Image (spheres, rainbow, N blue to C red):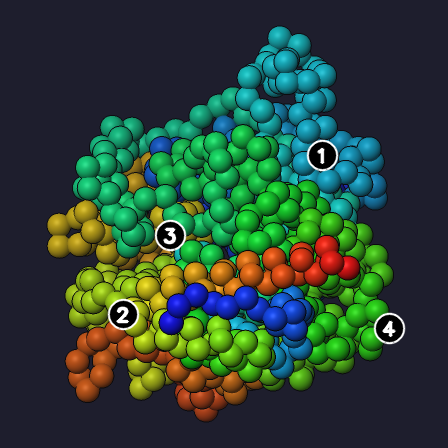
Amino acid sequence: MSGYARKILRVNLTSRNTSTIDTKDYEEWGGGHGIGSALFWDLVPDKAITGFDPRNIVTIMTSPLSGTLVPGASSRTEVQGIGAHSSPIEWFTRSNFGGRFGAMLKYAGWDGIVLEGRATNPVWIDIRNGDVEIRDARRLWGLDAWRTQETIWREMSEGGYKSWVNVKDTDDEKRTTQRPAILTIGPAGENLSRMGCLIHDAGNASGQGGFGGIWGSKNLKAISVVGTGGVRIADPKGLIEARLWAKQKYGLDIENPDPSWWSRFGYRRPQNRFWDQQENARLNACIGCNTGCKERAASGLGNESICDESAFYAGYDKAKHGGKQTSAAYMATDLLQKYGINAYEASQGLVYIRALVRMGVLGRGKAIDCNLDFRKIGEFEFAEELLTLIAYRRGIGNDFAEGFYRAAKRWGRLETDLKSGVLPYPYWGLPEHGYDPRAEVEWGYGSILGDRDINEHDFNSLFWYPSGAIWAGRTPQPSAEMVVKIYAEKLVPYENNPLMLDFSDENIYSEHMAKLVVWHRHYTRFWKQSALFCDQRWPDFLNTKAPSYQGLTGEGEPRFYNAVTGKGLTFRDGMERGRKIWNLDNAIWSLQGRHRDMVHFADYIYDVPFGGIGKYAWYFLPGREKGAWKYIQVNGRRLDRAKFEEFKTRFYQLEGWDTRTGWPTKKTLEGLGLSAVAQELEKQKRIGI
Amino acid sequence: MGALKEPSRRLARQVFREVSFEDRFEGYSVRQCSGPTLVTMYRFEEVVSFFNHQHPRLDFGDLEAWVRNIMDDTELADHIRGALSEAESNQSRCEVVRGLLEERLGQCRKASRRKEREA
């Protein structure tokens, strides 16, 4: 079992007992999400419970690649369980985060953790290699996510960072210089906010799903892990050779760096930050990663934050301060993390409530009474006041903490604001990502056919190739025809079908597009969420350094996976495993109450043109026009309700699911070796025909 | 078209007010992770700041109309129209329009400070 630590930690918070699960029993699922779904299936008899029910479990899983030298794959950790965020049903869902927690867990000898039950008092879990202790966390309860980590670090090093960390509490001789990796909640989670996150170090958050609130409901404050072991590699030489091969053939060319991020594997550091780069900052990477997409700044503010948490306040800060980025943006982002609040929900929520202010319905003495002084927006004080209301459920913050979809419902505005799009929550009561369902449809389709905003950037380059060039008045390179050819060759098992990448109005409801969505669901379920290849780097379809622009996807994933595990898995095998995991997830959703009739977007996706009709001339994607490939404008598009229903039928047919209900069929499940799952669905009268 | 004239006190006041939801201006900010994110702006300063985003996306005709009709700044709107006709790409339009907006904002700030001193 190379790559695996061979055991999974099972923690019953109710009885305060720990035990182990043999990873071998779940090895067929690969790791990460696959094992997490299988564990959930086995350990939660009633799938129709809610997220805060103590019978709900949370799995925290690594992959065989965690803690190894596989580039862009050694640091992710997958979190699963019934979430608290989505609506109308709190779906079995997922989230994941980077940093060093997953690797440290492997070094401590664990492939993952299963959290069950609910503690009577606040607790934290102290893992030092094989020693696990459930400890009293009453003195940690109430601390923010950063102070919690500091407190645990201090305790474990006997009074500060000057000392080494005790590997074993009872043996003073056993020490390590490593700092424990800690996953924790802040006040938002403690107060059962559905926007509550799990926070690790700084800049790493398991954001979606509301797992912070779930932990709060379990009275679990933190998990600390320190490990001094390693990961057994099946073919160490092969792994080094694979890494050198990837670097030389696909990595960044120092002499001639690609200025864009076309090549997901070889490009420069990702353009993730939304705020202005701080002076005197350096790169920082997750453990084992070759990228360094984060940064640490001498200011001590905003450290390691990238992506959407850096977007939360950057624009407001600049607008308030004459176009200058001040400490307000960095401090607001730091506070999001200290409180453990989902940045995406907070960002979209702020846009929403500000719209309500300007409509005259929210404010002091208004229909929705709110004392926030929006004249101060852009100042740190405003962000602090808003986030404090949410984290501690003070005043109207009690509504906000439920997520802004549920808040809108409380205020009687849900239907109106979803119709107009003022509340931009297109799927499952969750905030919209910029890759809008009306434009880049595979993102929206994947989200509504799943459980959450997929947040998988696999095909976004198709938008970036042309859109920046056309905006700048240049001819896009490479051509649409070339791009779809390269991508299509890699879409195993549907390879060499370029029509899967035709984003024209005529094609977005077709079987070809359904195949793209199926491919995407299966690829991400195994390669990205179970093997845990990072979304920032994988897949690599088109690589400007490589001959003929052919990126390493298809060859790279199994080469690395096999070097670590020695399994001899093909890319196609991985896709099939992804299909199996996706089917198990759909079986769980079916038992939770899913039916195809509830699988639809919010009204504005059908009724309001994206970006206004022709207003913003920049959203281009590959498509065919009169039979010829070009980059086509998709602005102004709305989805058609009836055609989307036809699309769903095509999608269900491809998956082998019941087209009336969307439930998995006995034949499909049995064909995947999931007979027990089929039997349970049959028993619950949720099996497809 | 030459430089922008000093704004009147009325115009300077206008620039710093916050408009209603119906009179908002919208554009998109484009970044790798988030994709094109809708940016809703209620103040002139926010529009100016929007142009400092790394990849702002907007309809320039809409902007001209917003400046003319909502900000009630005919002179600036005329300047924007003139600049747009000369620029070759949206990116270069962004640059010239940003310059005009920043100039106007600076003028209005000065006028506002002057008024404060006089008061």
Marks 2/4: CA–CA distance:
50 Å
Q: How crowded is mark 1: few (under 14 residues within 10 Å), some or many (20 or more)?
A: many
Amino acid type at image mark 4 = Gly
Amino acid type at image mark 2 = Glu
* Tags 4 and 1 on a common chain: yes
Q: Closer to the camera: disc 3 or disc 2?
A: 2
Task: Write down the residue under mark 4.
Answer: A365
Asked if disc 1 and disc 2 are in contact, CB closer than 8 Å, the reply is no
Q: Closer to the camera: disc 1 or disc 3?
A: 1
Furthest toward the front, the residue is B118
Q: Which residue is drawn at 67% across and 56% down?
A: B113
Q: Which residue is drawn at 13% across and 50% down?
A: A547
Asked if disc 1 and disc 3 are in contact, CB closer than 8 Å, the reply is no
Q: Could you say which quadrant of the image residue A144 lies in?
A: top right
Marks 1/2: CA–CA distance:
55 Å
How many marks are shown on the rendered structure?
4
Task: Write down the residue under mark 2.
Answer: B88
Amino acid type at image mark 3 = Trp
The percent coordinates of residue A196 (x first, y second) are 68, 53
Task: Write down the residue under mark 1.
Answer: A148
Image height of A162 relative to A630, above or below: above
Furthest toward the top, the residue is A173
Image height of A491 relative to B21, above or below: above
